[in-house]
Image: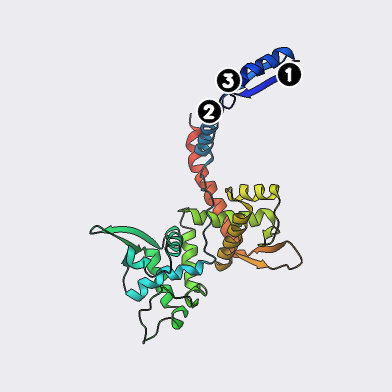
């Protein structure tokens, strides 16, 4: 049996190819080459076929610097204080302390289908959706506004509001609205994030929730990234898990148990969280069947 000397066409300079053939002849090796471009083409073709026949293709996880879903109130309250369902883009942006805060929270509200971008008379507006109006009305029914809106100050400016009052918590009705949005079948990136996290907790039995100081090995990083459909560094990965854990705690899907004597905290699925992950799995199964069943006719 002859040994084979294998090299990549695109990655091997011509001057080295002659040397490879010379060495192969000297030691009686077979010389074979492969094309990286052709492998890439075949890989993409196979992945396209798998996606087409396997059902729903979930998007990658996206890390945002938002520690709690209650921060959605910061986007919605200006609509309440201004008494409108649409605000000019720049007028809403002025309510935030920085452009970064505005764009990150806008993205969060858009992915949860509370607001949408529309254009009126050559101007960009951000408008409340039907979900957004329900979310706004739920604020009015809660105690969240009592600390920030009074008769003396009916229309507060949120630009430099660092009091934290509007970031406290979601009301019960707001949680129900967000759950309704999560289950409506429209899988935006951040909704997908929550499903990925619930599946992560289910697969690891809640034993792998890292702390900021936790040292994650290379193979653990690869394993967690695989579950989350991401490719993050250790630091970003831990930050993402922290954020998603907070989101799921906000929605009462999970409970986190701090463990001072261990590298990892314990996270358990609540009965509601177990039902939600079951729903997501069933939803994906039905979508997969919807695609695959017609392919049985051939």
Tell me the residue that label 1 is attached to.
3
Residue neighbourhood size for the residue with mark 2, other residues' Cα within 10 Å, grouped as few (<14), some (14–19), many (≥20):
few
Q: Residue at x 53, y 67 (%)?
A: 68
User: Are the residues flagged by discs 1 and 3 in contact, CB closer than 8 Å?
Assistant: no
Tell me the residue that label 2 is attached to.
37
Q: Residue furthest left?
A: 121
User: Which quadrant is home to the N terminus?
Assistant: top right
Vertical position of residue 76 compared to residue 54: above or below = below
Q: Residue 108: where, in percent of width, then height?
A: 46, 61
Tell me the residue that label 3 is attached to.
14
**Secondary element type, mark 1:** loop
**Secondary element type, mark 2:** helix
Q: Earlier in the sequence, mark 2 or mark 1?
A: 1
Q: Is residue 247 left or right of residue 147?
A: right
Distance in Å between CA atoms under marks 1 and 3: 22 Å
> Who is closer to the viewer here, 123 or 208?
123
**Secondary element type, mark 3:** helix
Q: Residue at x 70, y 16 (%)?
A: 23
Q: Residue 48: where, in percent of width, then height?
A: 50, 35
């Amino acid at each position: 049996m002859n040994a084979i000397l294998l090299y990549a066409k695109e990655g091997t300079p011509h001057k080295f190819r002659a040397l490879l053939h010379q060495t192969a002849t000297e030691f009686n090796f077979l010389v074979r080459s492969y094309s990286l471009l052709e492998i890439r083409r075949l890989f993409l073709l196979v992945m396209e076929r798998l996606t087409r026949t396997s059902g729903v293709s979930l998007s990658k996880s996206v890390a945002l610097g938002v520690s709690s879903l209650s921060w959605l109130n910061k986007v919605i309250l200006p609509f309440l204080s201004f008494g409108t369902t649409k605000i000019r883009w720049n007028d809403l942006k002025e309510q935030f302390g920085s452009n970064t805060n505005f764009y990150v929270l806008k993205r969060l509200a858009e992915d949860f289908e509370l607001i949408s971008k529309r254009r009126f008379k050559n101007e960009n507006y951000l408008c409340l959706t039907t979900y957004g109006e329900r979310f706004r009305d739920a604020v009015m029914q809660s105690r969240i506004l009592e600390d920030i809106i009074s008769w003396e100050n009916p229309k507060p400016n949120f630009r430099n509001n660092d009091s934290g009052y509007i970031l406290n918590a979601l009301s019960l009705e707001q949680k129900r609205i967000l759950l309704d949005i999560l289950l409506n079948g429209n899988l935006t990136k951040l909704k997908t994030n929550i499903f990925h996290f619930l599946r992560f907790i289910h697969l690891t039995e809640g034993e792998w929730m890292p702390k900021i100081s936790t040292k994650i090995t290379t193979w653990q990083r690869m394993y967690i990234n695989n579950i989350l459909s991401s490719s993050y560094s250790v630091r970003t990965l831990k930050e993402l898990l922290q954020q998603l854990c907070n989101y799921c705690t906000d929605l009462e899907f999970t409970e986190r148990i701090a463990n001072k004597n261990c590298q990892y905290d314990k996270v358990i699925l609540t009965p509601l969280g177990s039902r939600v992950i079951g729903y997501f799995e069933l939803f994906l199964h039905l979508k997969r069947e919807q695609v695959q069943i017609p392919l049985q006719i051939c």
